[in-house]
Image (cartoon, rainbow, N blue to C red):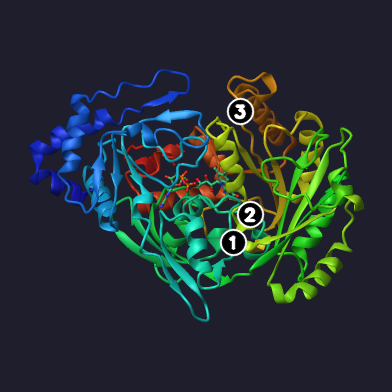
Amino acid sequence: MRTPTICFLRQNNTIFLRIFMVLFLSGITANINLGSNLPSTATSATDLDVQSWLNSLSLDGHFSFHDLHRVSKDFGNQHQSVPSAILQPKSVSDIAATLKHVFQMGPSSKLKVAARGHGHSLRGQSHAPGGVVVDMKSLQGPEMRIHIGKVPYVDVSGGELWINILHESLKYGLAPKSWTDYLHLTVGGTLSNAGISGQAFRHGPQISNVHQLEIVTGKGDVVTCSEKQNADLFHAVLGGLGQFGIITRARIALEPAPKMVKWIRALYSDFSIFTKDQELLVSAEKTFDYIEGFVIINRTGLLNNWRSSFNPQDPLQASQFRSDGRTLFCLELTKNFNPDETNTVNQEVKSLLSRLSYIPSTLFMSEVPYLEFLDRVHVSEMKLRSKGLWEVPHPWLNLLIPRTGIHDFAKEVFGNILTDSSNGPILIYPLNKSKWDNRTSVVTPGEDVFYLVAFLSSALPSSSRPDSLEHLLDQNKRILDFCTTAGIGMKQYLPHYTTQEEWRAHFGPQWEAFAQRKSMYDPFAILAPGQRIFQREYPYAMLT
Ligand code: FAD
């Protein structure tokens, strides 16, 4: 592994000695807490050396050294980190050439590279302090290819947004099977995590619906992989938190798309009955197409949160229902249909609902086009943006809770730690472990059924205490502490840790395999430094 680097160095001794120094210095991290002054944008001598080195690469696209603050924040909006350069790739070989050169700098260089999808991560995961951020959106565009056949699929760039895939595939009457609630996320970004929404109980997460990937590894190699070809890299990258390679292309499974959905909500005041019904639905053969739920704590005005888009035709009785201070649990369901199937689908829905025990007067029903349903969060985004409430700090916490712990968890968290849910939605819905492939890198609890519980809070900087970032972070800490002391067996989704000990605990028995894969595909720990799993040190494997 070290031989090529040494040979390369012998040939280019003087230049590389200088570059080593430059890159070593440039690797000093530039993490800045919000609220502190931004670093100066003046270009230092070190920056200029990095610039001239990067500019010496022959690319289809280009490096940008200005406007670096454009990629210095993410959706979480709690940290800033400025890179030395942004790569705007126009081809896969641009990414490969960059990574190959950084790799050939050898172990003493500190230069890091992070792919940035849409920057919707929460804690700086797409940052590369002092390094190179690869703007994956530059790769999106005309290359999307739909294959219509017995097993339809679409080939897309890793920087493609899911909303664009939906628009394009709908032209052929097709759509991906598994989604996230919000579609303005990139393929590479969600496949690096898992990609979960209300369809996952049936189809598995998005990482269970990929046929093939093209990856640029941390050594700059371009590798096509699938279940049958380079299978270890394929599984490593899925849920791999960007640690093993940059996803430049993905082949995503498609299915016939319905034209419409019946969109249903109903309320429960008893958590046990709510979860019993959710579990009944996710285990049934004939069931709904999408199953989620959310928690409403101490609210009297009902269902007016950012995900609600029900229209005034909802039953009057339901819209007048009041919580009277009770904690309520809202079941959210959809059933897909085409207009010529209306009667049949109405019967099916009626029959399925008859098996459930929600509060009868709270049944909300609506019919909307499939596209409108899938892109529902974007409507809320537009509203929040218009009020300046989108770019606030988002101290989100996403947890996977094993079924056996969900009641203790709910009792303490919804009954004690949280006093209000007005800071943002709290999602809760069960997932079937059998739909997750345990060869991938993602970590889930070890039970057949586990719940996604997502606290999607927004902090208002100038607000009083319950909405403040400090208060919300403290609340998250209390939830995490409770999980530890009560032995809930929780795993974080979109995980965030700051020490390798915590990462080891997160991966548990999977840590050795994860670290082994790192030493295979990114031995100098160049990739996705913002996840803070591996230090850019060599041989990092000695740390494991
Ligand atoms: P980024 O945030 O830019 O990147 C995320 C990580 O992946 C970084 O480490 C980055 O380096 C790496 N990465 C990015 N692109 C690539 C690539 N091509 N190859 C390799 N690594 C790469 N998630 C769900 O599962 N379900 C949901 O319903 C859901 N809803 C959301 C709603 C909103 C409003 C937001 C903001 C996020 C939501 N997410 C959801 C979380 C989302 O999956 C993550 O934010 C994820 O990081 C995707 O965002 P991104 O494409 O902007 O990637």
Q: Is residue 457 above or below residue 380?
A: above
Q: Are marks 3 and 2 in contact (CB under 8 Å)?
A: no
Residue 333, position in %: x, y?
74, 57
**In the image, which is nearer the foreground, mark 1 or mark 3?**
3
- Name the residue that disc number 3 marks: 459
Mark 2 C-beta to ligand 1 under 8 Å: yes
Mark 1 lies on residue: 178
Callout in the foreground (3, 2) = 3
Which percent across, then down, holds residue 297? 79, 35
Q: Is residue 284 above or below residue 489?
A: below
Q: Nearer the viewer, residue 421 or 533?
A: 421
CB within 8 Å, label 2 to label 1: yes
* Gap between marks 3 and 2 measured at Cα: 24 Å
Q: Which element carries disc 2, helix, strand or loop?
A: loop
Within 10 Å of the Cα at label 1, are there few (<14), some (14-19), or many (20+) other Cα atoms?
A: many
First along the sequence among labels 1 and 3: 1
Instruction: Identify the element where label 3 is drawn.
Output: loop
Q: Is residue 260 left or right of residue 148?
A: right
Question: Residue 132 sits in which quadrant?
Answer: top left
Q: Is mark 3 within 8 Å of ligand 1?
A: no
